[in-house]
Image (cartoon, coloured by chain):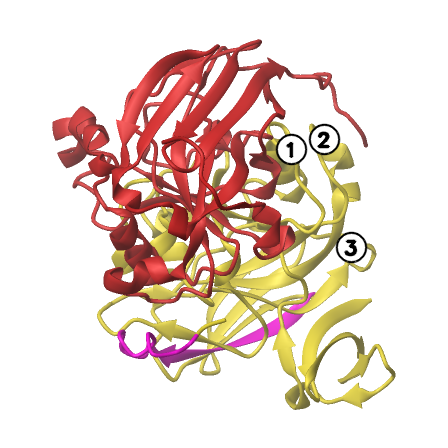
Chain colours: A red, B yellow
């Protein structure tokens, strides 16, 4: 089923200025398989123990319908259709058993990056491009989703289905992830925790229409556009 | 001007330094110990720069970088002057890092270094804690090391940029229980403040209220519950922090959070 009865704007939860958006890496079973034995040698040395997380700063946020600029130094971008957990009440050191009580609802994100292989250092230059984290169009109320660990996720480029995945394949299911993150980070109302993007992300470039769709949550659409800014310094 | 945000008498106030006292925006004067200090601003994005002092990079036996090693910290990690920071019970090495924090005042995109300081609103002191036992080699340094609750102390003051003509020539000192353990100068940065603004604004937009933590010099040592850690930067401020023991997990769930 696509779409849900109860939706609310993300802006109704918390305040945008204080919002934290966190992404999760290597949380799909396929991603760990793809790195395979590499994870046991330098520079990684061992498979990850804690969730591998990154922060999506405010300048990267965009929303449904917005054009996202492909930077001049980049040929194509990787799409990252993923589920976002929107926090409904202060979550600090919650147990997996009760984690869903802290979730107000679910939202779709298309978490773009410049393609890169090495994940030893934070991929700031690859991920922190303006508009690269599209979130929307609305938050599906928690009650509209029976089981967040059984949601189909689809990525489209120009209307063509390019990738299908399911939250069934998460290494850390939704509740476990929330428990492990809030063990050391308090999350607040309106914060968004992205559960991770599936392996073998489709790519797209300037002019492409991209979309991410999640069962019971909805569909998020954007268009990739040329960078409207001059390559020179904008202001001084 | 030195600006602060404090809680006093049941409300949150803006305040400025007035000699040894705080002058609240409503005209009341308070002593340092009478108020609860908040971070002088609620940062938008917090950038942190690793290995930005040559000697500290050697201390951690790591290579120096051709471009800045940047990572981000989240809002949960921010706390103010005189805050308490929890040390997990199961670890061996948690250390402070005294850093000059640069607060962006005007949006910056593709800014050359000679214009960079025009985009700075001011400076504050940061103590950027790390729990090294939790270090893993994915997106290193990972959030469990660096973005823990109350692990980014900021304050006491936001000092206007106009009052800091030479941010690249400020002495840095840290004391643990009164013993000086870290000494350096912002002149030791590999990538100085203008270089960091040029670098970051070269691929993304810096927004007003963003904060750049510029890295720490050599001299980081383990701290334990009960320790008083004072991080100080010349002309910017003296930021006090207390290390406490972390309460055991499992007692928080009965609390009916908002």
The subunit carrying tag 2 is: B
Q: What label does residue B184 carry, if any?
A: none
Quadrant location of the N terminus of chain A in the rendered image:
top left
Q: Position of residue B95 (x, y in %)?
A: 38, 65
Q: Is residue B4 above or below residue B109?
A: below
**Residue position marked by numbered label 2 in the rendering:** B111
**Residue position marked by numbered label 1 in the rendering:** B201
The subunit carrying tag 1 is: B
Q: Position of residue B198 (x, y in %)?
A: 65, 33
| Classed neighbour count for the residue bearing mark 3: other residues with Cα under 10 Å, few (<14), some (14–19), many (≥20) | many
Which circle's residue, 3 or 1, is located before the other in the chain? 3
Magenta stretch?
Answer: B236-256
Relative placement, left or right, of B148 versus A65 is: left
Q: Secondary structure at mark 3?
A: helix
The residue shown at (19%, 24%) is: A34
| Classed neighbour count for the residue bearing mark 2: other residues with Cα under 10 Å, few (<14), some (14–19), many (≥20) | many
Q: Position of residue A136 (x, y in %)?
A: 53, 36
In this rendered view, identify the residue nearer to me: B190 or B6. B6
Tell me if label 1 and label 2 are in contact, CB under 8 Å: yes
Cα gap from disc 3 to disc 1, whole angstroms: 19 Å
In this rendered view, identify the residue nearer to me: A74 or A22. A22
Give the total number of marks visible in the rendering: 3
Q: Is residue A38 above or below residue B147?
A: above
Is residue B173 magenta-colored? Answer: no
Which circle's residue, 2 or 3, is located before the other in the chain? 2
**Residue position marked by numbered label 3 in the rendering:** B161
- Tell me the quarter of the picture where residue B145 sits: bottom left
Quadrant location of the C terminus of chain A in the rendered image:
top right
């Amino acid at each position: 089923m696509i779409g849900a009865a109860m939706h609310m704007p993300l802006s109704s939860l918390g305040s945008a200025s204080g919002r934290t958006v966190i992404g999760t890496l290597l949380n799909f079973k396929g991603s760990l398989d793809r790195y395979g034995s590499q994870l046991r040698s330098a520079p990684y040395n061992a498979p990850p123990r804690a969730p591998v997380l990154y922060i999506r700063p405010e300048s990267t946020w965009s929303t449904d319908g917005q054009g996202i600029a492909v930077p001049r130094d980049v040929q194509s971008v990787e799409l990252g259709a993923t589920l976002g957990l929107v926090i409904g009440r202060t979550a600090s050191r919650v147990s997996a058993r009760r984690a869903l009580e802290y979730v107000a609802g679910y939202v779709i994100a298309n978490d773009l990056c410049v393609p890169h292989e090495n994940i030893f250092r934070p991929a700031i230059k690859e991920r922190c491009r303006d508009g690269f984290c599209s979130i929307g169009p609305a938050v599906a109320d928690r009650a509209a989703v029976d089981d967040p660990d059984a949601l189909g996720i689809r990525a489209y480029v120009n209307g063509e289905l390019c990738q299908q995945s399911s939250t069934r394949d998460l290494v850390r299911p939704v509740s476990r992830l929330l428990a492990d993150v809030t063990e050391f980070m308090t999350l607040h109302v309106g914060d968004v925790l992205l559960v991770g993007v599936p392996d073998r992300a489709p790519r797209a470039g300037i002019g492409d229409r991209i979309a991410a769709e999640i069962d019971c949550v909805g569909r998020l659409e954007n268009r990739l556009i040329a960078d409207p800014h001059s390559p020179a310094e904008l202001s001084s | 001007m030195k600006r602060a945000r404090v809680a006093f008498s049941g409300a949150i106030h803006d305040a400025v330094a007035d000699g040894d006292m705080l002058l609240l925006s409503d005209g009341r004067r308070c002593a340092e110990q009478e108020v609860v200090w908040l971070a002088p601003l609620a940062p938008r994005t917090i950038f942190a720069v690793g290995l930005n002092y040559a000697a500290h990079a050697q201390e951690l036996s790591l290579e120096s970088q051709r471009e800045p090693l940047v990572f981000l910290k989240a809002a949960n990690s921010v706390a103010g002057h005189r805050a308490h920071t929890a040390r997990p019970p199961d670890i061996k090495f948690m250390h402070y890092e005294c850093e000059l924090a640069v607060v962006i005042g005007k949006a910056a995109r593709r800014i050359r270094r000679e214009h960079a300081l025009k985009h700075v609103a001011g400076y504050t002191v940061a103590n950027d804690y790390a729990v090294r036992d939790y270090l893993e080699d994915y997106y290193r340094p990972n959030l469990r090391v660096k973005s823990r609750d109350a692990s980014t102390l900021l304050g006491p003051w936001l000092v206007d940029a106009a009052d800091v003509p030479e941010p690249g020539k400020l002495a840095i000192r840290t004391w643990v229980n009164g013993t000086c353990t870290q000494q350096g100068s912002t002149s030791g940065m590999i990538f100085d403040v203008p270089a960091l603004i040029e670098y970051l604004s070269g691929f993304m937009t810096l927004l007003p209220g963003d904060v750049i933590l510029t890295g720490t010099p050599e001299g980081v040592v383990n701290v334990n519950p009960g320790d008083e850690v004072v991080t100080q930067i010349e002309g910017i401020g003296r930021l006090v922090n207390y290390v406490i023991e972390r309460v055991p997990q499992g007692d928080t769930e009965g609390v009916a959070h908002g």
